[in-house]
Structures are given as structure tokens and as C-alpha cells.
Amino acid sequence: MRYGVAIDLGTSGYRAQKIDLETEEIRRTVITLRNPLPGANVMDHMDFAIHYGQDLAHGLSVNAVKNLFQTLGVESGELERIAICGNPIQLSIFQGITIEDLAYAGERKKKKYNIQEQERNARIVPSSEIPGLEEFDCEVVVPPAIKHEVGADALALIIKSGMLEKDEISIATDYGTNAEMALKVKDIIYTGSAAAGPALEGQQIKHGNLASPYTISDFEFEDGALRNYVLSQEMKATPGDLMDPATGEVLEEGQIKAKGITGTGVIALIEKAIAHGLVELPKVKTPDGLIHLQNNILFSEHDLKEAGKAIGAIRAGHITLCSTAGIELSDIDTAYMAGAAGTYMDAAKAQKIGLIPYSTGRICQLGNTSLAVAREILLSEKRLWELQDIANEIIGTHIMFATAPEFRDAYVLELAYWEEGMPFKMFKKYLKKKGLPALDDPISSPVIDKRVERDIPVLGEEGLHVLERVGTYMSMVVEDCPECRKCIKVCPNDAISIDENNMVMISTDLCEGAHCQKCIRACPPDKFNWANLKVFEQ
């Protein structure tokens, strides 16, 4: 058999498909619930790679992909081609390309440190050129970036939306940990990327999960009670329990059990809870400050604030793009939603809480555009060079949200709204005072075009396989270890183990990375030093 593998190297997790190159049929789909690099977002991944070595980050990424191959059931001798897609940081780390030009904003700083921009055009290279993949005698197909900081994932979003072929003003957003977005006004594409954090992917929520079987993805109220909807093994929303959300009483058992809540479920819950008086920002208005979901899954005020940060970052991004383009949010005719969150969330509910511009009358849900493009270029070299031609023709303006005053001003107001309960009228007043695009009220009935039922529409005859654990590790030997095991005790995710030979093993998919580092602070720096870590080869 001749197989190819298409891979979406996502910030929150990897998604891969085994494809029969003779028939072009998808045979099996595998997803991971986390990224192999320590940390919860793209900034954490970048920080880890810069401070602890891009070779280390590359080794973890390649090992994760090898684990995908194993779960896909692809042997090295039958693997003919790999195609990847994702943001510039994930693609560069996997290929072993330096990310220094992506890590530093501003030409002055790049010049000061003599940082050269890397070429990120479309290319096909032998796997032997990528360290760690030498054993696979195959091709690796890489799609182009639009500009060095506007990656293949943004191009995939723009292409699959069809926005280039239309004259209307439109905005496309890939809802995830690193929320890519593109605004089209006349012939110009304005792009940006908001580090929204992982709440929209169900992470940093106490009982949160990525969209996967047996996770709650939606809610509706029925006569004052809360109906849970849970994803089945086929990733279809299935009626779950009917609950009293204030007490946790099960009023009617549903057809399916749940293990957690997705980011889309969080969005639906917030919209319904606000509408029915369960939430009055920033408070949960129940006796114990918790919303009770099925199977003892809880939603807290802390969860509400984490989700609010993500929602606020995305809306601040939309405001910033519109400000740069010189338009109002109300000028946007169509909004495109991509990614798992953009597929499974109820678009009307998402619009009511600000994830889609309030006045936009048409909303299209696209699915996983990054994996779709990876599959296209896996099967057609011609398609790869077509994408390069399109990338060359796009007149693009990229806004670095990290340094944009418009984003800073909008996001500060978002935090005041979500975390401090600033009234919506005051929010709108301060936007006007800052000279930023205005917010109006949500329209009642947008036209919703749900083009796919699942973010990955076709799973293949061998079905979906979920890797709860990525299976990548870093290790080091700690000489004269005091054996206090403080590092293990302080780790919030049980990511660390130590054997009898003082070999420290860190499960990288569980490690929270730069914004945690409790293990480093718990141990003398000459003992527990991350600079000594190496990729553990199994």
C-alpha cells in the first residue's frame, strides 16, 4: 500500500489523517488532546523554544508526529508523503527552522540582534532533511506563508472561506488558543493573531477538554432546567442529562455520559447562563457560586473569567483589524468560523456574547481548514504551487496585536467588562472615547451556513482515535538529588516522575511551561536545571 499522512500541527493539539494515495480515501483519523511542547499557548511554546533550545522543541514535535504515525498504523516502508499545515511557529519548530524572526516584534530589535527573516515559501523536501525523520524515506510537503508572520494556517483559512472571490467585507477567524483572523476590505487582507489562551479549546477550565467523544458541547434551557448535549463517539451532539444547574439535581437522565466540557460548551453555557440570570458578570448567581452540569462537572467563576479573557482577546482583535482598515464592525457582511471551536459552537450564541461582530448578518462555519489544506497538498503538488501563487498575490497588512495600541486599549476594556462587571453601556462609551469601532447590539436572527457537521468531516473507515496523552518526554539526571520530591509535589498536573537512579522524566504535554515553573522554584537551581533537559527517546 502507498500511504500519505496529512497533519494539522495545532497549538492545542495535533490532528492527522492516514490517506490511501491510490484511491485518495481517508482511512483513519488521530487527534491529540494537547500539544507536545510545554505550555498552554503559542507564546509559551515560543518562550520554551527560545530559552531552552529549538532543537529540544523540534525533537518533541517530531516525536509526537512519530506517535501519530504509530497510532495511524503507518509503517515507514509504506509512507510515501507527509503534508503539514499550521501557524508559522509550529511549522518552523517541526521543520527545524529558527523562530527568532517570529519571536521579536519590530525591525529595530531584529536589526539589533542581527536576526534574519526566514524563508517560508511552499516547498517539498525529503524527510532526511528533517532531523528525526531520517528513517522515513518519504517527501514532506509544506504550504507557504503569506508573509513570514502570516502563516499557512491563515492562508488555509482565507482560501477555504472563499472570501477572496467575493466583493463583500468579510472576516474569518480560526477560534482556538492562537486565534488567527483575517479581514477583507476591497482588495486588502488585514491579518492578526490573538493569543486568546486555551479556554476556547476547553483547557484552563477545571473540567475542560478539547472537543472529543463524551464531552459536553452545547446547552439549552427547557422549562428552567438545563439540557446538556454531549459529543458521541462519532462526534455528534447527543442529548444528555436535564439538570437543575443551581443544585445539581438530575431531573431526567440523557442518552450519554460526559467526562468534561468543551470550549464550545463553555460558550453556550455562558450565553444561556447570562440570558437566564445564572450569571451576572463577573458572578455566578447560584448559592455555591457554581453551575452544576451532568456527571458532577462544575463551572466556576474562575472558569467564567478564563473564558472571558479568551472572548475578550478575540473581540479586541476584531476591533483592532476594523480600526486599522478604517471601517466599523457593523460594515462586516459575512463572518467565517474555522477550527474545532468554530465548528461545534452554536454560532448564534457565539454572536450574542461577542465572538462574532454583532451586526453581521451571515455566518459560515467551515471546519478544520488547516487539515483540509494539508490533505489537498498531500494529494496534489499542483495545488501546492497554486497556493504559493495565491499567497504571492495577496495584498496583506499584518497587525502585531502585541504592539498595537488599539488592541491594548480594547483588551483593557474587555477585562473590565468580563472580570470587573463594567456595564455594557459604559464599555461602548469608552470605546467611543478611545476612537475605536463601536459595538452595537446583537441581531436576532443571523443566517447561519453550517458547511460541515464536524470540524473533520470525514474520519475514514477505521474511525477516529483519540490520544489522551501525546507520549513525549524530557529527561535529565539530577546529581546528588536531595530526594525531597518537592518538584513532584508542587507540579499541578502530575507531569514529573523520578526513578531510583534520579532520572527525572517530564511529560511535556502535561507541563504548563513558562507560566508555571513551580518545579524549578522548589529545588536548588544547581540541581533541577531545565537547561540540562533532553528529549527522551523511547
Image (spheres, grey):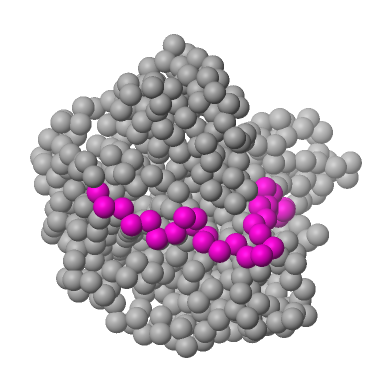
Q: Residue at x 69, y 41 (%)?
A: 495
Q: Is residue 456 magenta-colored?
A: yes
- Please identify the quarter of the rendering in which residue 49 is found: bottom right
In this rendering, position of residue 513 left or right of residue 420:
right
| Point 15% across, 51% down: residue | 330
Across and down, in percent, residue 117 comes to 42, 74
| For residue 116, above or below residue 404 | below
The answer to whether residue 426 is magenta is no
Q: Give the camera-side residue of 411 and 299.
A: 299
Percent from the top left, x then y, of residue 289? 44, 17
User: Which image quadrant: the C terminus?
Assistant: bottom right
Which residue corresponds to the image point at 49% horizontal and 69% vertical from the top-left? 372
Q: Residue at x 59, y 51 (%)?
A: 234
Residue 286 lies, in percent from the top left, at 42, 15
Residue 142 is left or right of residue 498, and the answer is left
Where does the N terminus fall, quadrant-wise?
A: bottom right
Judge whether residue 406 can be spotted in this image.
no
Give the image location of residue 263, x and y in percent: 47, 42
Q: Which residues are magenta?
A: 446-473
Main SS of residues in magenta: loop
* Looking at the image, residue 59 lies above or below residue 519: below
Q: Is residue 140 above or below residue 103?
A: below
Q: Quadrant of residue 461?
A: bottom right
